[in-house]
Image: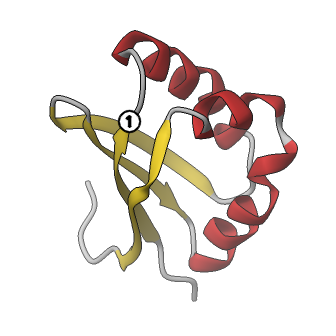
Amino acid sequence: MTTPVLEIAEFRTTGETSDFVAAAEAITPWLAAQPGFRARRLAEIEEGVWIDCVEWDDIESAKSAADRILETDAAAAFMARIDFSSLTMRHARIVISR
């Protein structure tokens, strides 16, 4: 039995918020097409600080997508707007989901 996971990335962005949101929206169809994808939520904690949560069927699906994400053109625009020095990434085992 596989265990669903929540991929949680917290980071600061660079540049205009509208550009970041557009880049985040542009990469969502690619994410949704990946095996094991369930859902994505992007939220702003405070101005310029974001949390990107992606739900996956299992950790293998999450890691597989992470290995391939840079192969898509949309990833470049999205990644260019992230301050990688502020990035924290975690995976959490989902216990309850409705």
The residue closer to the viewer here, 21 or 31, is: 21
Residue 10 in percent (x, y) is at 32, 55
Q: Quadrant of the image for the N terminus?
A: bottom right
Above or below, comparing residue 52 to residue 2 in the picture: above
Identity, as a three-letter code, of the amino acid under mark 1: Thr
Badge 1 is on which residue? 13
The residue furthest left is 46
Q: Quadrant of the image for the C terminus?
A: bottom left
Q: Residue at image x 81%, y 57%?
A: 68
Which quarter of the picture shows residue 58? bottom right
The residue closer to the viewer here, 74 or 93, is: 74
SS category of the residue bearing label 1 = strand
Residue 48 in percent (x, y) is at 25, 32
Residue 50 in percent (x, y) is at 29, 41
Q: Residue at image x 56%, y 67%?
A: 57
The residue closer to the viewer here, 59 or 16, is: 16
Residue 90 in percent (x, y) is at 40, 73
The residue furthest top is 18
Above or below, comparing residue 6 to residue 53 in the picture: below
The residue furthest right is 71
Above or below, comparing residue 6 to residue 77 in the picture: below
**What is the total number of numbered labels drawn onto the structure image?**
1
At label 1, counting other C-alpha atoms closer than 10 Å, the crowd grade (few under 14, some 14-19, many 20 or more) is many
Which quarter of the picture shows residue 28? top right
Q: Residue at image x 70%, y 37%?
A: 75
Which quarter of the picture shows residue 74? top right
Question: What is the basis of the colouring in this image?
Answer: secondary structure
Above or below, comparing residue 96 to residue 39 in the picture: below
Residue 32 as seen in the image, left or right of residue 47: right
